Structures are given as C-alpha cells and as structure tokens.
Image: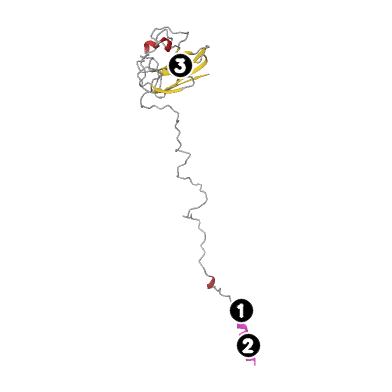
Amino acid sequence: MKTHVMLLGCVGLMVGCEAFKPQESVVDTAAVGPTPVEPSGEPSGEPSGEPSDEPSNEPSSDTDTQDTSDPTALECKEDGGTVDTLTNIMCADGYIWEGETLDATTIGGTNYFTVDHYSSREWYCNPDIQDNYDSNERAYIFLHPGTGFCEVELETRCGDFDLIGLRYDVEADGCPVPEQTMPGANPCEWSARTGLGRTESFTLYENSQYEIPYLIIVDSGDPLNEWFRLSITCQ
C-alpha cells in the first residue's frame, strides 16, 4: 500500500514539473510572408515629384536668349545711296522739315562746299579749318517757323561728319560762293567735334513773323561715304 502511494506521488510530481519547463515558440506557417525590408538612407534612383534645390543645367528663358539690340538704331549699311529730291539746285539735295528724322548717306551726294566756303570771313563759320572738305556732302533746305528754338542734331555712329547751318535762302539767291556776304549777324552755325560717334548739334533761334530759310549741311573734312541720321525738333 505504501508503495502504491509513493508511485502516485512521484507521477504527480513529474506532471507538475513539466508545467514549469520553458515553452518553445511555435511558428505559424500560415502567417509567414515576405520579409519586411528596413528603410535605407541611400538615395533612390526613382524620380521624385518633390521640387529640388539642386541647380538645373537647362537654359533659362530670362538669360542669354533675349535680343538686346535696338531696332531703331541707325544701320551702317552698304546698299547704295539715297535719292535726291531737288535736281534744279546743284548745292542742295532736298528738304528737311520740323519734327522730321532723316536717315541718309553721302554716297552719291553733291560735292559743292569746300574749305574755301567754310573759311570765308564773310560766312562766320570757322576760319581756322585745316581740312579741305573735298568730299561728298548732303545739304537740305529747312524752313524755320520764325519764332522760337529749333534743335538740329546729327548722329555720326557710322562716320565722323560735321554739321553746318547757313541762314541763307538758296532757292531765291542760288548757291552761295566763297567770300559772299551773308545776311544777319550770325549767319553760320558750326559743330565739328573730332571722333566717330560724337553727336553734332546746334540750336537755331529766330524771332520773326516769317519763316526763315536755312541750308543744313552734313559734310566731312576727308572723303567719306557713310550713313548718318539728321533730325530737327522745334519748341
């Protein structure tokens, strides 16, 4: 009887000990899937929709593609001369009017005025001229409105021209000659700065109830066939 009781106690002890043994983990094979990948700090090769701070190599539409040239600038072209509108006066090519801007060239122009004219004491232009002015010039009749100031301007970016203004009625009195007496106390205006691209200009003032005729001349001390821009603005 004691032996039987002892066996039962031992069996019970073994069952109790099994309850306290560590349990092995059980893997549910039905729940096993792809192994998750931890995110990496390396950049991805896929394009990103997010804006980038990196400089772009693409050309900018705001730089290097804009045309900065002036479409109104005087062109120094070589496609022939301008046409005269006066054929009955050998020392004048045409008219220029108040408010007009005229692009013209000395190619095919008249060759009337020389150093003998401009250095005449009676003309009061410039008696100390060194050049001979044996070259083509352009001369235009201008009618001053009679009162106020008129600014005459010559753009010389293509050639070094001089600007001369004579208070003279060429249509009534014919072409002037050297040593000829000119009307008025100051019959000649002269602008002759040396250097290409130096704008020549002077102001004509009158106080009269009648229009005052002038002869506006574009000339060069040395032979020169180039373009120029002549304009007159009155106030």
Q: Residue at x 61, y 88 (%)?
A: 7
**Can residue 149 be spotted in the picture?**
yes
Residue 19's label in the rendered image is 1
- For the record, the magenta segment spans 1-20
Viewer-proximal residue among 80 and 23: 80
Query: Quick one: SS at disc 2?
Result: helix
Query: Quick one: SS at disc 1?
Result: helix
Front position among marks 2 and 3:
3
- Tell me where residue 85 appears, x and y as whole percent: 40, 19
For residue 90, what is the image quadrant?
top left
**Can residue 125 be spotted in the picture?**
no
Q: Are marks 1 and 2 in contact (CB under 8 Å)?
A: no
Viewer-proximal residue among 123 and 39: 123
Of pointers 2 and 3, the one earlier in the residue sequence = 2
Circle 1: is it few (<14), some (14-19), or many (20+) Cα within 10 Å?
few
Please say if 13 is above or below 89. below
Of pointers 1 and 2, the one earlier in the residue sequence = 2
Residue underneath mark 3: 142
Front position among marks 1 and 2:
1
Q: What's the magenta bit mostly, secondary-structure-wise?
A: helix
For residue 139, what is the image quadrant?
top left
Front position among marks 1 and 3:
3
Amino acid type, label 2: Leu
Residue underneath mark 2: 8
- Tell me where residue 165 appears, x and y as whole percent: 44, 14
Queried whether the magenta region covers residue 57, the answer comes back as no
Circle 2: is it few (<14), some (14-19), or many (20+) Cα within 10 Å?
few
Q: Are marks 2 and 3 in contact (CB under 8 Å)?
A: no
